[in-house]
Image (cartoon, grey):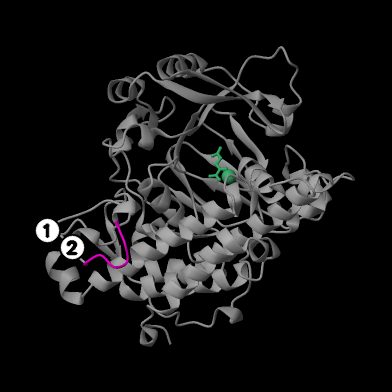
Amino acid sequence: MASDFEILDLEVPSINQEILPQYPQNIQRFNVNEISYNDFYWLFMERNVPVVLEQVSTHWECRNWVKSETAADSFDTSTTNKTSINYDYLKERIDNTLVPVANCGVEYFNSHAKSEMLFYDFLKYWQNEQGNEHETNPTELSNRKENSTDLLYLKDWHLKAQNPNYDFYKVPKHFASDWLNEHLLATNSDDYRFVYMGPKGTWTPFHSDVFGSFSWSTNIIGIKKWLLLPPGEELKLNDRLGNLPFCIDEQLLEEHNVHFYTLLQKENESLFVPSGWYHQVSNVTDTISVNHNWFNACNLERIWNNLSQQMQRVMAEIDDCRQMDNFNDHCQTMLRASFGINYLDFIQLLQSITERRLIARNNNTASDLTDNHHQQKTTTTRPLSSMSSTSSPTLSSKLIFFDHYIPNDYHMQHDLQRIVQVVDSMLQDPVICDDRIVLYRKCIQLKETLTSSFIPSLLS
Ligand SMILES: O=C(O)CCC(=O)C(=O)O
Ligand SMILES: [Fe+2]
């Protein structure tokens, strides 16, 4: 019987990445089965370069959300394969709960106006939209008058968190090293796993992703048009006040001499969106996608830099309150509100990622992996409070990502090494140095845990 588990085989990079051009002419494409985990890791994730993986969702349960119609072409005798939304199946499989909906016709504080509606009401709206000819160009849409009809986009829906037992998709192995969701699921916190559904013409305004994270997006049905800018290119679009546009198009990008990529993402394709790449996305046809945001060893340093820069902005904003008691605590509260996490949250994430790898590494003998890994599986949802780096290693503490993937020893060692590097940067940060009792002490403890438990021979 084939095992349910796959090893994430990471190896020392064999190519000198510095000799590669920074960005390719076009966004490259690979069949998901034809690019190894290791190549994706070093050539795209580590270098922060976008790539499309094809044939990703072929075996996902959510292909049932879509039906194939073999339609006879009226002009000749050939037949064409068309897919359409299977509203009945969606209703059968998913409860009628409140879902988050954006109105793509209404701009509200640099985003689209958001509300909630019942899922079946959204499906009814979507079904009624069929045949309505909408404007699909975001620039035209943002110029629409207020009385134009709603254009609703169900987005940022935590469907998997709401239905943990409904296995409607399988995270592709290439995206499985995901410290953000690994940590959040382990602590029963909000996750960054989403479903998007919307009629032709719905769109997401120009933005970069939360924390400066990576994202992946897999289309179950439909076509998305992406405009993607390498980090820094967005600065050419700043107005005199330093604000970025809400909506972009090719003409605007060309006028400002911006280097950008246009990508049409089709059904069954995943796009890897690197850290800090601004993008705008529009649904050229009715579209359903599954998306994650995440970070890992490859973009950890970027996340830390973004967090510390945002902290500097927060401190500058309330500089006149510096004499106040607990000034630093107030800043950390504001940081969490504006950025999503604060310093303590970030350190706790690093602690939990470290702890899991130290426990699992003690446990991952080669014989374990080959002989036993199909006997018992754990998810990443075990509370960390029940783990400690001194607990005796058992099979149940094996590290398994998204129920399927086991990192090899080199991978775990590499992860730990990157955490050491970021903790070294953190120990230089004035905010951390100022807070000797909590932040500085926690960083020092983490560094000690890490350096006292390395097997140096694994990393050359
Ligand atoms: O598909 C969309 O509308 C937006 C997706 C997005 O921004 C992302 O995956 O980062
Ligand atoms: Fe995004």
Which x, y percent locates residue 339? 63, 46
Task: Name which residue lies at 73% across and 37% down.
Answer: 246
Ligand 2 falls in which quarter? top right
Under circle 2, the secondary element is: helix
Q: Which residues are magenta?
A: 387-392
Contact, mark 2 vs mark 1 (Cβ under 8 Å): yes
Task: Name which residue lies at 34% across and 69% down.
Answer: 358
Q: Is residue 356 above or below residue 133?
A: below
Which x, y percent locates residue 444? 52, 70
Nearer the observer, 426 or 37: 426
Categorize mark 1 by other alpha carbons within 10 Å: few (<14), some (14-19), many (20+): few
Pointer 1: what residue? Answer: 375
In the rendered structure, which amino acid carries the disc numbered 1?
A: Gln
The answer to which quarter of the image holds residue 41 is bottom left
> Magenta stretch: residue 33 in it?
no
State which tag comes first along the sequence, 2 or 1: 1
Report the magenta stretch's main SS.
Answer: loop
Which one is closest to the eye, mark 2 or mark 1? 2
Q: Is residue 121 above or below residue 321?
A: above
Distance between the alpha carbons at the discs numbered 2 and 1: 9 Å
Q: Is residue 405 above or below residue 109?
A: below
Q: Count up the numbered dots.
A: 2
Nearer the observer, 133 or 333: 333
The answer, for residue 56, to whether it is visible in the render is yes
The answer to which quarter of the image holds residue 3 is bottom left
Pointer 2: what residue? Answer: 395
In the rendered structure, which amino acid carries the disc numbered 2?
A: Leu
